[in-house]
Image (cartoon, grey):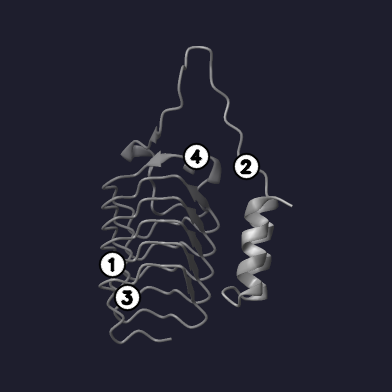
Amino acid sequence: MNQERMKILQMLQDGKLSLEDTARLLEALQQPTPMLSLSDSQSSLQPYEAPIAEINPNRSGGFDPAINLGSNFEGAQLDGANFSGAKLLFSNFNNTNFRHANLENVWIAAANLDSANLAGANLAGACILAANLEGADLQNADLRDCTILGANLDRVKFRNAIMPGRRLVFVNYEGVIFQDSMA
């Protein structure tokens, strides 16, 4: 059994994770990792810079998870964008505007969301792992059944957020604002 599975099972045994969270995390470990192919002319992997023309917040389907490995959306305006079910891995969303975006059931891992605006966003069922949300705005966001594990929540604003069923595990709460949040 690999080290990640052992840690997850230990967290279950210690009462830090529910059985449902444990099952979700173990299932995520079993999912194949997107493969990248490097052309002969590429000597190193470079982050994907998404041209603004490719960002369409009104798409009916979610973003293709494969394009969100190491993507750089810093400062992008993604108001109302549909990322439902996407896997956003090792991506930069510093100062990105996600107001009223659909991030339902999204997986965000090892991503930078420093000062991101997620006000009114739908994050129901989302799983946020080892991410930096320092200074992010989650006012009026829907965080029902959202799992946040090992994240930096320093100065995050959860004012009026909908939060029943949310799980916050191994997170930094310094300066967090929960005023009028609905648990």
Q: Residues within 10 Å of mark 1 (few under 14, many from 20)?
A: many
Point 36% across, 66% down: residue: 100
**Image coordinates for residue 102, horizontal then vertical, percent:** 44, 63
What is the three-letter code of the residue carrying label 4?
Ile
Q: Which residue is mark 2?
A: 33
Dot 1 or dot 3: first in sequence order is 1
Can you say which quadrant of the picture contains the C terminus?
bottom left
Q: Find residue 109 and report its horizontal and vertical position in percent.
A: 48, 53
- Amino acid type of the residue tagged 2 in the rendering: Thr
Q: Marks 3 and 4: CB-CB under 8 Å? A: no
Numbered tag placed on residue 67 in the rendering: 4
- Classify 10 Å Cα crowding around label 2: few (below 14), some (14-19), many (20 and above): few
Label ID, residue 158: 3
Q: Which is more foreground, mark 3 or mark 4?
A: 3
Query: Helix, strand or loop at disc 2?
Result: loop
Q: CA distance from mark 4 to mark 2?
A: 13 Å
The amino acid type of the residue labelled 1 equals Asp
